[in-house]
Amino acid sequence: MTEKTAATPAGSAGTDNAIHTRALAYRWPGMDTAMVFPDIQLARGEHLFLHGPSGTGKSTLLGLLSGLLVPERGTVQLLGETVSDWPNGARDRFRADHLGIIFQQFNLVPYLTASGNAELPCRLSSSRHKRAGPGVSTVARSLLAQLGLDDDTAHRKVTGLSIGQQQRVAAARALIGAPEIILADEPTSALDTDNRDRFLELLLTMAAEQGTSVVFVSHDQALARHFHDHIALEGRS
Amino acid sequence: MNALRLALSLTAASLWHRRRVLALVCLTLTLSVTLLLGIQYLRTEVRQSFNNTITGTDLIVGARSGQLNLLLYTVFHLGDATNNIRWSTYQKLRTDERIDWVIPLSLGDSYRGHRVIGTNTQFFERFGYGDEQSLALASGDWFSDLFDVVLGANVARQMTHRVGDRITLSHGGGSTSFSRHDDLPFRVSGVLEATGTPVDQAVFIGLDAMEAIHVGWESGVAIPGRTLSGDEARERSYQPDSITAALLGLKRPILTFQVQRELNQYTGEPLSAILPGVALSRLWQVMGQFEKALLAIGGFVVVTSLVGLVSVLLTLQAQRRREMAILRATGASPALIASLYSLESLGLALLSCLLAVVLGALGITALSPWLLEHYGLQLGLRALNTDEWAVLGSVPLAALLVSLAPAISSWLTSRRQGFGGFE
């Protein structure tokens, strides 16, 4: 963790940003040219809509932001820390402590209950556990309840839930323990329009309540109206 | 610590979730561990019981032959004597000052497939087996009348004979002998306690009774008019010409080799004197190869089922990519992901070992009466010895070792993993 202090920029402006990327480029094995990404600067508590048709490297960008991938060039700063310079283990810990993740679908560990899935980040990170409070399962159940899943559903195996319900469990998992950032990769693409809007409203409202920034990736321009900040990804260059 | 607890609880939940698939793997592993453990357990027990077939006897003396042959026909009642030893030699042994006691053995007849052993009360008093145990009667008495017979425990049980029953012996060995001593029936005077040795399969009569039933049989078959009736027989006194073999107990065991050498060089007739302990371990060496082969087969069966376990884990790995991607994205390290595979494998192996011990204990409890009845093997439950613990302990270790295959491969995959899986 010594690198962490060393990598912190001297300026104070960085700490107000949830995300700040500079000149990011990434090349998958077998690719001739690297994908380059526009710079992102997102203040804490703000929500960002990242629009791009498929093939524009949305998932790659999310991989870089989450610290699962290391950029070929450029830096990723999260909460003022230049996470992209850190070793693997430290990035994993940072992700556990400060990031919530929602995938497109198949978001859940199949052998855990809905509340077991929602509690998962608190079991991987003690700081999320602390922030969630002493009764983690109570917190998980109340989050699930706020998202419209009753107690009975919370104790069911997730394999029996509908896709809409599964995505709401994933949202609860991303929100629990109030992480500073949530990365959502087309979480609504498998939902119908009604469900999609309700899901997005709920996610953004609950994230705003706990001061969490949301980066929302979608190819669906219709969702852009829920966001102040927009960034469009274009084809690779 | 937290990570370990999480890994353990995820492992438990995952094993339970996949219980239908894994139950079969677990069953295979359980059965193979039961087999291996059972072989190891039986091996110890059989060797123990085998080495304790005869104790307290310092020398076995018979006509000149190999030591295994002599051991087989005197102690295990298998095969036939090459020759007899003279009565005069027997008398010499009895009067030798260094020799404490002599048990004469006269073989040749049978009772429904069980060897008839002509001997005297010395056998009952001096014969030792197991941990220096001596024979005991379950019911009745050692023979007092000329035509009394004492039965080994298994003979009595198989034939459902009790004290007072009358039985007819057959001439020669085999269960379907045509010449029978039916004019001179015997009365069962006693039944021995089970010993777990060949004694249980034998029928004991006095040396003089052995002579009496063979009066008139000098040519090999009964010659009418020359055989005796029961009352005639009791009035006569008998001096056998020969006996088959003798068991010796020395006053000072240190003289064993000296006496053995003298007997082997005896000029009166060709004799062999053997040390039962040495002969038993020679015999065990012959059978020990078989036992080691069995153990090796058991080991291979366990290895086979472990390979089966890994192949199932590897198959499941493909299905579990999504789950691992979720855990990774939530902040789990590649090491945690890899440990899930090792822990599942270890968990299954431990469960299998536990089940194998329970299954083995139940099996021994259920089979021991049958084994005693059919094989004269006394098998009881006892605490596992270090060898068996080693066998049992090697299974989870091996499982851990083979689990490295899926663990390492998932560790590598999850290090390369991008957001939401594998682009």
Image (cartoon, helix red, strand yellow):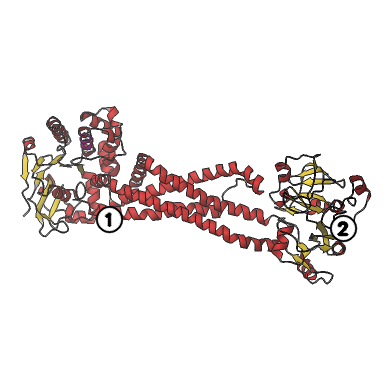
Q: Main secondary structure of the magenta part?
A: helix
Q: Quadrant of residue A29?
A: bottom left
How many other residues sit within 10 Å of disc 1, few (<14), some (14-19) or many (≥20)? Answer: some
Q: What chain does mark 2 sit on?
A: B
Total numbered labels: 2
**Residue B220 rendering spot, x and y as whole percentages:** 82, 56
- Identity, as a three-letter code, of the amino acid under mark 2: Pro
- Identity, as a three-letter code, of the amino acid under mark 1: Leu
Residue sitting nearer the eye, B168 or B24: B168
Q: Is residue A168 magenta?
A: yes
Alpha-carbon span between mark 1 and mark 2: 86 Å
Determine which of the numbered discs, if any, sits on residue B412 in the image: 1
Residue sitting nearer the eye, A183 or B125: B125
The residue that label 2 is drawn on is B240
Seen at 94% across and 48% down, the residue is B235
Q: Is residue B103 left or right of residue A27?
A: right
Seen at 5% across and 55% down, the residue is A237
Residues rendered magenta in the picture: A166-170
**Residue A11 rendering spot, x and y as whole percentages:** 11, 52
In front: label 1 or label 2: 2
Q: Is residue B228 left or right of residue B106?
A: right
Residue A60 in sight here: yes
Contact (Cβ within 8 Å) of mark 1 with mark 2: no
Q: Is residue B9 left or right of residue B280?
A: left
Seen at 12% across and 47% down, the residue is A58
Q: Residue furthest front?
A: B224
Q: Is residue A236 magenta?
A: no
Determine which of the numbered discs, if any, sits on residue B263 in the image: none
